[in-house]
Every structure is written in structure tokens, then in C-alpha cells.
Image: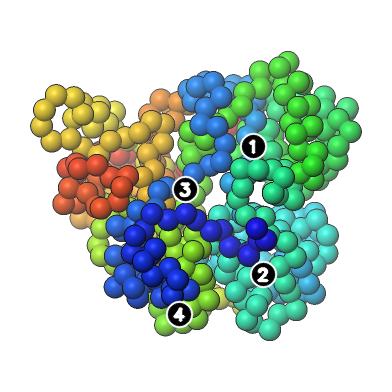
Amino acid sequence: MESTGFQYVKTTDTNAEAYSMTQQSLQQKIDAHGGAWRMLYDSPAEPFTFLVQSEYSNWIDEQRAWRDSAVFQDMSHHMQDVTFEGPDVVRLLSDLGINSFKGFRPMQAKQYVACNYDGQCIGDAILTCEEENRISIVGMPMAANWIRFHAETGGYDAWVEHDDPPSANLGDRRRFRFQVQGPNANALLEELNGGPLPDIPFFKMGRFRVGPHDVTALNHRMSGAPGYEFWGPSEVGQDVKDLIVDAGSRYGLTFVGSRTYSVTAVVSGWIASPLPAIYTGRNMRPYREWLPATSLDANLSLGGSLATGNVEDHYFTPYDLGYGFMIRFDHDFIGRTSLEVMPPERRKKKVRLVWNDEDVVDIYASGLGKGERYKHLDMPATSYATAQSDRVTLDGKTVGVSFYPVYSEFDRSWISLGAIPADLAVDGQELTVVWGEPDGGSKKITVEPHVQKDVRVRVDTHPVKRD
């Protein structure tokens, strides 16, 4: 099937199926459900899935290898990869993103963040430029969809040159995308390169070889561990993988499965799937009327104890998600005015929340014997909704948000990332996460009957642990 520029999803929403022949847009789907909250909170959509094997050995060893030797992650299948081209492509991206593009040129990359008109995040993605006037956006499809909308409707001389939606078949994609990371990663890649690797600073790009094949690399260094994300033509992807596997046996290379993917995101300090701030607001209506009802944005599920009935309580600014340092007011962009005048007390700070071991044990113990049970914690990552937000409280008052929790083998504890007021972002500050949904749980098929549990958490102001 020819790509349409959107990540389409299979839905089990019977309401959606009933009017799928007449419903065309996200706005029509919201209207048919009687509002965005009803559409999202009881959505039957399952959490985001990674199109790789769940485990290659076991998730504990796979997590350890990430810090102790080297890991291989195949990211060729699950991310949207959209290439925009044209004389106005940099201006288009600058007009929509909080990032500065002053001095931007080929072989540069950015973690790109786009906001709505009120300065609330629509999505983030990795932006890479290999040649002038040609830029790729890789990640969840929210940011790419927003860019595409403006490319088509905003009078820009820019267009989608190519779009690779997620696919389990590498042959459906233009590029393979691998990551090799860990203490032994550089030695392994130097052997494959036939000599020292080029000096590629953090979040810069370069090129080296894997055997006879040229690859383009991005210095990602998640959590500070050495290594690179790199890509090349999909037709040589299997040969590149085979060469890595053969050499990797000498460096303790371990394949990482999907059960660990979510853990690495949280340990790296990245909030992977906050709700895109698109479902309300008059000025966002044209976008909702343009966005297909079959897009991922229209088929998300919203979950967690932050069940206020108002989707806008699940909108977050770049400050809340730890992107405040990326904001540059050296250019006009959608959302700039709101962000520029936002008072400091409204700017939350991203932190790591370390869950209390005794409270976690209580959650597991509730599944044994008789009596009420708490919402199950599925090891090593508990993600039962696409966008998951739990209340963080102090003395019973909601003060912030916790995103989906994971078990970190490196820390030997459950952790989550959170957004809390700056005055509470103090190492050792004790807060509470309300775990589980109210009233016995929502109608999501991923939610079993349960009661809520208050979990004590300790604030760690350094969500990313650099080695």
C-alpha cells in the first residue's frame, strides 16, 4: 500500500467501526464520542508496541548489558521516518519548533519539539539533515503530522519527499536504523570501521563504515554510555546486522528486546508519549479537521489516576517535559508568546521519582490470596495506555504528574519520570504517587478491576545518570 503520510492503527473501537465509512477526521471522531475525554480515557487502543522480539535472552541481562558491555537495538521498524524537502523546509521547521535554526546546516541534528498556540507540546522527534533543504523527522508521528499539515496548508515551498510508516518488514522501509551502545560499543564499532571512529560530538552527525558499508551516525549517548545510532539503505541492513553480530561475540554484545526498550527510555530521562495537545481549542480545530480519524493521534488511549475528565490537564509545556533549555526566543514560532510570558510558578521541573520498595511489595502482595488488589505492575515496564499520567501528591493535594513506571535493574528499584513544581524538586523530597485509576478502573481492555494505592516516592533531581 502506498504511504499516505500517517501512522495508521488497527482499532477495536466498535463505535469507530460503526461510523468509519462516514467519519473522516479526528474532529468528527471526537464529536461522535461526545468529547475528547470520552474518546481517549475509555479507548480500547492498546499501548504503543515495538515491532521487535520481546526478549532475546532475558530482560534482566539485557538491561545489565546496556551498562556492562554493549547492546544492539534494532529501531528500523517502529518509528515513523518522514523526509521533508524544499527551499522552505528550514523556515517551516523553524516556524513550528522551539529550537533555533541559526547556523543550521547539513550533518546536524536536533531533538525537535513542536507546540500548539498555547505553548503546549504536540510532539518531539529526532531531526536529522544530511543534505541542504532535505530533513528527516524520526519518532512518534505527532510532530511529523503537525509539520505535514503546515507544509500542505501554510503556503510553504516544502513537501513530503518520502514517508516510512512503521512496518515489521524492513523491505517496506527505505532505511535500517540500529543502535550499538555500552562500554564496549566504541571498540566494537572501531573494529567494524577498520580503524578509529571519527570524532562526533554529542548530538552531532558523522559517517563511518560497517565492513564495506557506509553508515550515517548520530551521537545519542543515552545515559552517557558510549555508542551511536546509525542508519543506511534497507537493502544492506541484514548484512550490516550480520557483521555486527559476528564481531559482537568478542565484545559481549547483547540484543535488546522490546520489554527493555521502554525501560531504556525512562532511565535515559525521556518522557516517551505524553498526550499531544491537539484535542481542544478553536485555533487547533483546522488541524483536527485535517488529521485522519485513522491516525495514531486519533486512536490513543489515555490512562492513569489523573482522571479529571479534562484532557487539557494532560497537556504539558516544554518546561514540564525537560525541554525548557531548548527554547530559543531568537525566532517566531507557534506557541512562542505563551511560553515567553509564562510565569516561573507554572513551569514544572522534570525529575526522577524513586518508588518506595515496601509500597511496591504491597502492590504485588495484593495479588495473592483474597481481598482487593491494586493495579498490577507488569515487570519491567507497566504501560497500559498510550499516554499515561498519574497524580503526584503532597499532603493529599495534587502537585504534579508521574508518567509510566519501569523497573530499572541498574537501580534495583521501580522508577518513573515526573513533572513537579520547582520548589519541590529537591533531592530526597518525599511525595506520593497515586497508582491506579479511580472507581475500580476505566473501561480500557488493558485495565483489570483494582483499587488505588498511594506509593511513596523520593525525588531525584537528576533524571539522567551520566557515567
Q: Secondary structure at mark 3?
A: loop
Task: Give whichever of discs 4 and 3 has the lower sequence position.
Answer: 3
Can residue 209 be seen from the camera position used here? Answer: yes
Indicate the amino acid at tag 2. Answer: Leu
Indicate the amino acid at tag 1. Answer: Asp
Measure the C-alpha gap from mark 2 to mark 3. 26 Å
Measure the C-alpha gap from mark 4 to mark 1. 37 Å
Lateral position of residue 318 relative to residue 407, left or right: right
Which residue in the structure is indicated by mark 3? 48
Measure the C-alpha gap from mark 1 to mark 2. 28 Å
Q: Nearer the viewer, mark 2 or mark 4?
A: 4
In terms of image quadrants, where is residue 169? Answer: top right
Indicate the amino acid at tag 3. Answer: Phe
Which residue in the structure is indicated by mark 1? 74
Which residue in the structure is indicated by mark 2? 93
Task: Give whichever of discs 1 and 2 has the lower sequence position.
Answer: 1
Q: Position of residue 271 (x, y in %)?
A: 47, 49
